[in-house]
Amino acid sequence: MEQRYRNFLVVYFSLTGKTKLLACEIAKILNCNIEEIIDLKERRGLLGFLRSCFDAVKENFTEIKPLQISFEKYEHIIICSPIWAINLPPAVRTFVKYFSDRFKSVSFFCTMGGFGDKKVFLKFENLCSKKPVICASFKQIEITSGKYVGKLKEILKTFL
């Protein structure tokens, strides 16, 4: 018998807006709440890009804006993240480190330019200390073209 959840929360980090599109579509399909992870370190521009790559490769943490949410009331947390240098962005790494002990169950969705999702999913699972219900990745071109929606609806049928 497959697991059914009633209360979902979508949590996302997005620097360019592509992961935000994915997260918003998931929240719309599942009719659930959504919360943004905000990195307090400046990551835009050339210097920000270089800092972001360095922090991702080194698996660094960062300071994120405090979240005003009670995770305990949600049965399932869906985390949406871009892949940076075949790693989790520091903001997502920080979020998972500090809050994963409050998750009852979790799924992970990512956006990426090319590859790295399998490695990132394993890192996410180890950091979270939970086996994700779903791990799904979408290439940036799928997001910008809108072709991801059909694939996403098919994947989310598990929850509906």
Image (cartoon, rainbow, N blue to C red):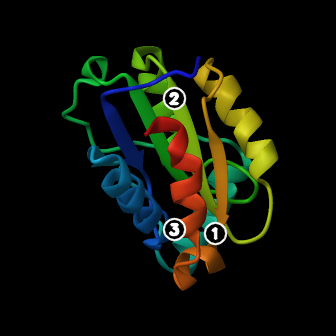
Image quadrant in which you'd find residue 83: bottom right
- For marks 2 and 1, give the CA distance: 30 Å
Is label 1 in contact with label 3 (beta carbons under 8 Å)? no
* Amino acid bearing label 3: Val
Sequence-wise first label, 2 or 1: 1
The residue that appears at 70% across and 71% down in the rendered structure is 113
Residue 141: x and y in percent read 64, 80
User: Most extreme residue toward the bottom, as rendered?
Assistant: 145
- Give the number of the disc on residue 50: 1
User: Most extreme residue toward the left, as rendered?
Assistant: 68
- For marks 1 and 3, give the CA distance: 31 Å
The local crowd at label 3, few if under 14, some if 14 to 19, many if 20 or more residues have their Cα within 10 Å, is some
Image quadrant in which you'd find residue 122: top right
Image quadrant in which you'd find residue 24: bottom left
Residue 102: x and y in percent read 39, 16
- Which SS class for mark 2? strand
Is label 2 in contact with label 3 (beta carbons under 8 Å)? no
Please state, as top left, top right, bottom left or bottom right, where the N terminus lies in the image: top right
* Amino acid bearing label 1: Leu
- Which SS class for mark 3? helix
The residue that appears at 60% across and 54% down in the rendered structure is 110
Sequence-wise first label, 1 or 3: 1
- Give the number of the disc on residue 106: 2
* Amino acid bearing label 2: Val
Q: Which residue is mark 3?
A: 149
- Is residue 50 or residue 14 the one in the foreground? 14
- Which SS class for mark 1? helix
Q: Name above or below for residue 43 compared with residue 105.
A: below
